[in-house]
Amino acid sequence: MGEAEDQRVAKTLMQRLAAMGVEVSLLPGGRCVRGRLRLGPLPFPLLDGPREFETLVFATVGPRLLKCLEPDALFQLPLVPIAGCTSAGMIEDRVRAAWVAHGSSLRDAERALRAIGAAARSEPGGATLAFSIGVEDREAAARCLDSSRLALPSRGPLSGIPLGRASERVLSRPAGETASDLEIALTNHLERLARATARHLQLSRSAPPAPAPEGLPATSRPVGSGHRLLLVGPLLGRDTELSAGLRQLGHRIRVEYSIRDALDAFASQSFELILADTHIGRAEGLELVPALAEIPGIERLPVVLVDERSRESVREAARRVGAAGYLAHPLDASRISAGLARLLLGRGRRRFARLDQRLAIRRDGVDPGFTTAIARLGLCVRTSRELLAGSTHRFTIGLPELRKTLRVDAQTVYQFPAAGTEGPSAGLRIRAFPDRNEPLWIGYLTELAEPEPEPLR
């Protein structure tokens, strides 16, 4: 179906659900319906005991399926068919039947794991089943999606390694007679994924750097002082007035329409603040906050969630997950500029991980020095001459492991005068990569952040 037909079907479905007594709203894009219905008093049997839920929140997927969004336990369910339902009670019955089948599948998985000696455990909330994969990182656990499929952990052998597709983290449970067989099969699979990803990264690094664009000579002046903002989701993505207003304030804007694309964007570029829709297709903007912590080199980026309308429940959920702010659409760039400035310039919130790494560096091609710490968008340097606070210079950084150099335009944020035998030092904020090879810098930092493998004994 085309987009117009999808929107027509969604409106018809919204009317049908409303007639059943479901509280409904049309999600941005007009192709999915968000529904909310009260549940009966019968408790849901979870792995850690029965529990009552007052309401169910879901999003429709086409005219015949729904995805449970809240409560968190029911989010684990696959898509639930609702074709033929004529009342809210029938929808609830379908969800309860799906939950019973899901619980039965997890109990089958638990029995199979215990039969081979694997210590499976119910995770908090009683909706998922996890077991250790037998590596040094004790938090690295595989999770059962059902009786036959496993979700692989991002910790352990894959720590800090971004895979190309989310599906690469899901596989059928390997056969094995003992828990050790299962652990070995899983760790071997994880290590193969890690090696394949590392080879792909190495090949991309070995490619010759892209030439500087025509009309940009080596002596060109650094770019302006705008901050890098990432806008995520269809509501913000279509708001051309907001993007134009933020650009007029000097900010550099990038727009992505899905959470996956937003996370993938960090492989080639770094951002200082994110504005995200609370609802992004069938996903939730809330998911971005914890997902960002899994990206190499990221410590804590400010994420501001933007809702279609102000809702206290969503505001509270945003606060719980650690969002930096919650706003309601529409946004006026000039009105929110002061709040964004506080988030962008606020102290005590380190956005990017620092790595203690000494690299040779030259300011404007002549003044030699070295770095004492490096990060995605920052450097601490020691030079032979003091740098004036606020001044912007072009620095050339040597990357000896790659046998390459990297040029950055960086502004002095703070500086310390020479003390004793130590020369002056300064903290720099990277403003631009004049040769457009920021992915080279990100890849270099990612490799440095990975722990060294222990020698075989």
Image (tube, rainbow, N blue to C red):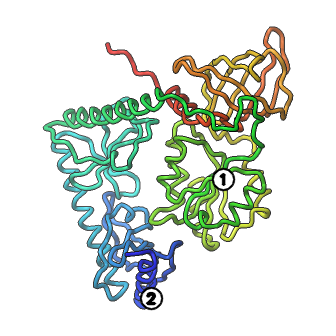
Q: Which residue extends farthest top?
A: 421
Q: Residue at x 31, y 83 (%)?
A: 90
- Image coordinates of residue 431 in percent, x first then y, are 71, 38
Q: What amino acid does circle 1 point to?
A: Ile
Q: Residue at x 60, y 67 (%)?
A: 238
Secondary structure found at label 1: strand
How far, Cα to Cα, is label 1 from label 2? 38 Å
- Image coordinates of residue 394 in percent, x first then y, are 74, 28
Task: Classify 10 Å Cα crowding around label 2: few (below 14), some (14-19), many (20 and above).
Answer: some
Query: Which residue position holds label 1?
Result: 253
* Label disc, if present, on residue 15 of the rendered structure: 2
Say whether residue 97 is left or right of residue 284: left
Q: Residue at x 57, y 21 (%)?
A: 404
Q: Residue at x 77, y 34 (%)?
A: 411
Q: Quadrant of residue 203?
A: top left
Q: Is residue 246 above or below residue 268?
A: below
Residue 292 seen anywhere in this rendered image of the structure: yes
Task: Classify 10 Å Cα crowding around label 1: few (below 14), some (14-19), many (20 and above).
Answer: some
Say whether residue 38 is left or right of residue 172: right
* Label disc, if present, on residue 14 of the rendered structure: none
Residue 315 seen anywhere in this rendered image of the structure: no
Q: What amino acid does circle 2 point to?
A: Gln
> Which residue occupies the foreground of this view, 51 or 177?
177
Secondary structure found at label 2: helix
Q: Which residue extends farthest bottom?
A: 19
Q: Are marks 1 and 2 in contact (CB under 8 Å)?
A: no
Q: Quadrant of residue 400?
A: top right
**On-image quarter of the N terminus:** bottom left
